[in-house]
Image: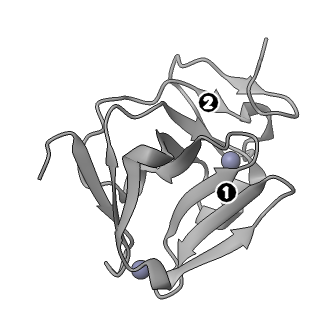
């Protein structure tokens, strides 16, 4: 396999996909929708342009849920792993959950998004920039 391709899969393994590096970014999202969709304090995302992303197996297992006016989340219908998020706000790329990838994407997390929307019990001790506001990406004082 091409070393620049990083494979990923859902928990049950039915859905397999890969992305071709370089990834576009890596960031933690604290928004309430991510927290509920993933059952987690926050979710670490990366992204790839559509032309560098492909579903290799299990496309028929993918279930799509439109979670907002602009966003659609995709999960495995068999095991429930949350896999992708697509948005009409960024039609050129697809967001991918870093935890489902099998190898290093060459990028460490760079920022916190929707930081002011975070769960009250979340403790963050790193020095990464924190963004928030209605778009989730506005600088925080
Ligand atoms: Zn699955
Ligand atoms: Zn989010």
Q: Residue at position x 75%, y 44% from top?
A: 120
Residue 38: image quadrant is bottom right
Ligand 1 quarter of the rendering: bottom left
Is ligand 2 within 8 Å of the beta carbon of the residue shown at mark 1?
Answer: yes
* Residue occupied by mark 2: 112
Q: Which numbered disc covers residue 99?
A: none
Seen as rendered, the residue at the extreme top is: 141
Q: Residue 33, relative to residue 123: is it above or below?
A: below
| Residue 33 screen position, x and y as percent | 74, 57
Q: Is residue 99 left or right of residue 7?
A: right
| Residue 101 screen position, x and y as percent | 33, 54
Q: CA distance from mark 1 to mark 2?
A: 14 Å
| Residue 59 screen position, x and y as percent | 45, 77
Q: Residue 134, relative to residue 13: is it above or below?
A: above
Q: Nearer the viewer, residue 85 or 98?
A: 85
Question: Is disc 2 placed on a helix, strand or loop?
Answer: strand
Q: Is residue 116 left or right of residue 26?
A: right
Q: Residue at position x 71%, y 49% from top?
A: 87
Residue 124: image quadrant is top right
Q: Nearer the viewer, residue 39 or 79?
A: 79
Number of other residues with Cα within 10 Å of mark 1, as a class: few under 14, some 14 to 19, many 20 or more: some
Q: Is residue 118 left or right of residue 55?
A: right
* Residue occupied by mark 1: 35
Q: Residue at position x 31%, y 78% from top?
A: 13
Q: Are marks 1 and 2 in contact (CB under 8 Å)?
A: no
Q: Residue 140, relative to residue 6: is it above or below?
A: above
Q: Residue at position x 49%, y 24% from top?
A: 110
Q: Nearer the viewer, residue 119 or 129?
A: 129
Is ligand 2 within 8 Å of the beta carbon of the residue shown at mark 2?
Answer: no
Ranked by sequence position, the earlier of labels 1 and 2 is 1
Report whether residue 94 is seen.
yes
């Amino acid at each position: 396999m091409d070393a620049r391709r990083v494979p990923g899969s859902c928990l049950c393994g039915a859905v397999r996909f890969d992305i071709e590096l370089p990834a576009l970014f890596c960031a933690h999202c604290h928004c309430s929708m991510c927290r509920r969709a993933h059952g987690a304090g926050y979710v670490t995302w990366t992204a790839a342009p559509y032309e560098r992303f492909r579903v290799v197996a299990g496309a028929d297992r993918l279930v799509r849920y439109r979670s907002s006016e602009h966003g659609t989340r995709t999960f495995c219908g068999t095991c429930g792993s949350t896999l992708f998020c697509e948005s009409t706000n960024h039609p050129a790329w697809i967001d991918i959950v870093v935890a489902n990838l099998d190898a290093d994407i060459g990028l460490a997390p760079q920022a916190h998004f929707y930081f002011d929307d975070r769960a009250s019990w979340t403790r963050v001790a790193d020095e990464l920039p924190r963004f928030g506001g209605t778009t989730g990406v506005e600088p925080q004082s």
